[in-house]
Image (tube, grey):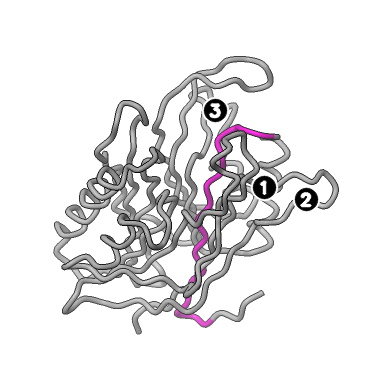
Amino acid sequence: MWDMTRREISVITLNTWKNDGHYARRLTLMGDGLAALKPDIVLLQEAFYTPDGRYHTARAIAEAIGLEHTQFSPSRRSVRVVDGVPVESFSGLAVLSRFALTDYESLDLPSDPADGQRIAQIVVADVDGQPVRIVNTHLTHLLNAHHLQQRQLERIIDRLDAFDDDTPVILGGDLNAEPHSPTMRWLMEHASWEARMARRRPQPTMLGVGDDPRQAAPQCLDYVLALHRRGGGATIRMVRGDRVLDRRDPRTRIYPSDHAGVRTVIGLPE
């Protein structure tokens, strides 16, 4: 367990892989694994949900790790098969927090019919009186869609530009882009915002346990980043980061998800 100071918080992002694989067992592995890590904030993507409430990945994980404050945004509606039965479902985003969440909104992003709806969540966490703006998102997975990913990030940046305050910003999620991709270069070199990550040598987060053969190649797709306005605004220290939830269960040999989680400790402004 990492040593934490009062002005540091632990943030984990995890793509939960909808209801694919051994969903019930994976849900337990994700909950138990995150509970052991004791994060302050968790960002979830592909959080499986059915309108009847029978399946709700975000709620189950929040209950397992004892995070009382949850914002869930349904998106990407589809019919999926659970236990052999087709069900209406959503693959949404969720922010789970030890701190109260305020100023919540779901932001529609540019999309492609071949991919479906894409959104970003924007919330403010009250961290011991210090507001922290949190953006959770999942960019398009379409191959060679750098221009669409950039337009999605531009929509997020435009929304952040509209906030007339110096609230620190954390951007996390599955960006479906490698560190040296055009998408990430655009974000890291943006004219008005500076993005920082704690991991100097990002490790692959796609574990290659799904049915898509493209997943066999190691890829770094998931990030926790600090954003601050160039030339002003409150800054966040990226203290340290690592990859988590990346091991098979010793008994069943099942991974918690097809993505590893990314954990980052963030130092807030004094």
- Label for residue 53? 3
- x and y, in percent, of residue 200 in the image: 47, 75
Marks 2 and 1 in Cβ contact (< 8 Å): yes
Work out how far the residue at label 2 is from the one at label 3, CA to CA, in angstroms: 27 Å
Residue type beneath disc 3: Gly
Q: Residue furthest right?
A: 251
Q: Is residue 260 above or below residue 229?
A: above
Say which residue appears at 45% left-offset and 46% top-offset. 94
Quadrant (top left/top right/bottom left/bottom right) for the C terminus: bottom left
Report the Cα–Cα distance between label 2 and label 1: 8 Å
Check residue 256 in the rendering and tell me which mark sits there, or answer none: 1
How crowded pointer 1 is (Cα within 10 Å; few <14, some 14-19, many 20+) is rated as many
Distance (Cα) linking label 1 and label 3: 22 Å
Earlier sequence position, callout 1 versus callout 3: 3
**Label 3 SS:** loop
Percent across and percent down for residue 153 are 27, 51
- The magenta span reads 5-21
Q: Badge 3, how many Cα within 10 Å: few under 14, some, many 20+?
A: few
Residue at image x 48%, y 57%?
97
In the drawing, does residue 7 fall left or right of residue 214?
left
What residue does disc 2 label?
Answer: 249
